[in-house]
Amino acid sequence: MLRPATLAEALDLLATHRGTARLLAGGQSLVPMMNLRLATPEILIDLGRVAELRRIDAGADELTIGAMVRQVDLLSDPLIAAHAPLLVRAAVHIGHVQTRARGTVGGSLAHADPSAEIPTVMVALGATLIVRSAAASRRIPAGAFLTGALTTALADDEILCAVTVPKPQLPVRASFREMSRRHGDFAMASVAVQMSGAGDAATLQVALGGVAETPHLCRGLRAMPPAAGIAEAIARELEAVAFLEDIHVSAAYRRELAAALLADGLREVLG
Ligand SMILES: Cc1cc2nc3c(=O)[nH]c(=O)nc-3n(C[C@H](O)[C@H](O)[C@H](O)COP(=O)(O)OP(=O)(O)OC[C@H]3O[C@@H](n4cnc5c(N)ncnc54)[C@H](O)[C@@H]3O)c2cc1C
């Protein structure tokens, strides 16, 4: 196990051990995968000491959340509460108190589970991911970063350093709803909704999680549907989704669930 103290050191180690090393963040997905021999890295590079990956900063237009910010911190940080309340709403649904205490924002995005709450919120909010290798840095929209179930656009010499979220117009209202078999289990379907601005200037940002291989951005729900037209707007939006089927849930049930969660989420923010 290698334990760099700075991002530059971590990037150099990753370049040196490219292909044989794996980054360790909170270990809440990687360690179970290693237990099952689904991952067998020769070297682990622990990011736990890299303080520059743990910052939360608010600029003029955007909020920047470091990749090593713990999921538990999303629940108490004042900048997150002010500028990304949807993330606070979602965080209570991520696993358990124990997993949130170690699991990180960047680890969740890099792991890219289709049901994970943080990727779904980042797609809804139009977040941008900041990724670096020893040689270069790039910014990737969340929707392009998440390329499939458990797959991302990250190269094996890159570290996800931070994620930026545009600051919303005020007032802002948020709703995150999901259904899982037991509390703390991964969601069968989830819905992230944020409404920002008031009156005619208000806009909606909506995404579905757990319904397809990657979060589904509800482009058709950006404009405010009239209260009487919510069901029709949802039905139109869901036509674009190829719903997953698994041993627990049929595609048809997932569609019903997504429609019900969307209706509840939209009504909550529309008031
Ligand atoms: C019992 C249990 C229940 C859970 N329930 C949920 C749930 O309901 N919802 C949910 O979303 N998650 C859930 N999880 C997973 C948990 O949230 C993990 O924290 C998360 O998936 C991975 O974050 P991590 O920091 O632990 O990353 P790790 O496990 O350390 O790493 C995960 C992967 O990401 C890579 N990685 C980590 N950080 C970076 C980085 N900065 N740059 C590039 N690559 C990186 C690692 O190399 C590894 O491949 C659960 C886990 C457990 C054990």
Image: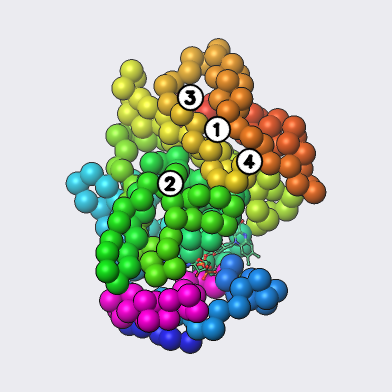
Residue beneath label 2, please? 144
Please state which of residues 96 and 237 is positioned toward the viewer in this rendering: 237
Earlier along the polypeptide chain: callout 2 or callout 1?
A: 2
**Does residue 36 show up magenta in the picture?**
no
Local packing at callout 4 (Cα closer than 10 Å; few below 14, some 14-19, many 20+) is many
Residue 81 in the image, given as x and y percentages of width and height: 38, 49
Q: How many marks?
A: 4
Residue beneath label 3, please? 220
Residue range (magenta): 6-28
Q: Quadrant of ligand 1?
A: bottom right
- Name the kind of residue labelled 1 in the image: Gly
Q: Which mark is residue 211?
A: 4
Residue at point 57%, 71% (across, down): 30
Query: At numbered mark 4, what does the secondary structure look like: helix, strand or loop?
Result: loop
- Name the kind of residue labelled 3 in the image: Gly
In this view, 6 is above or below 259? below
In this view, 10 is above or below 131? below
Residue 135 in the image, given as x and y percentages of width and height: 27, 69
The answer to whether 180 appears left or right of 198 in the picture is right
- Name the kind of residue labelled 4 in the image: Val
Earlier along the polypeptide chain: callout 4 or callout 1?
A: 4
Please state which of residues 13 and 111 is positioned toward the viewer in this rendering: 13
Q: Nearer the viewer, mark 2 or mark 3?
A: 2
Q: Which mark is residue 265?
A: 1
- Name the kind of residue labelled 2 in the image: Ala
